[in-house]
Amino acid sequence: MEKSLRKQGRARGQSMVEYAVVTAALMGFTVMGWPFLVQLLNALHRYFNSIYYVIQSPIP
């Protein structure tokens, strides 16, 4: 019975460590990738503006 309780304690600790590592990695990639994300959003905005420009142009 004692062995099963010890394994449960380790599993809880391991899951918390994994959660902390995954969260830190996601936050780090988000902060490091922020300028790239801004550029992607600007490019998407220009793309949609060009589509609307072509649709609304007087030349068929």
Image: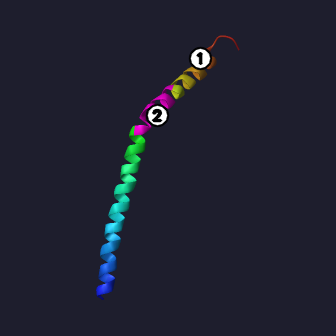
Outermost residue on the bottom side: it is: 1
Instruction: Label 2: state its secondary structure.
Output: helix
Label 1 neighbourhood size at 10 Å, few (<14), some (14-19), many (20+)? few
Quarter of the image that includes the N terminus: bottom left
Task: Report if residue 37 lies within the magenta region.
Answer: yes
Residue ID for mark 2:
37
Q: Residue 16's image quarter? A: bottom left
Q: Position of residue 31 (x, y in %)?
A: 38, 39
In the picture, residue 52 is in which quadrant? top right
Range covered by the magenta-colored residues: 32-42
Q: Which mark is residue 53?
A: 1
Which image quadrant: the C terminus? Answer: top right
Q: Residue at x 36, y 50 (%)?
A: 24
Q: Is residue 24 left or right of residue 58?
A: left
In the image, 42 versus 3, the foreground residue is 3
Q: Pick whichever, 40 or 6, lies toward us.
A: 6
Alpha carbon distance from label 2 to label 1: 24 Å
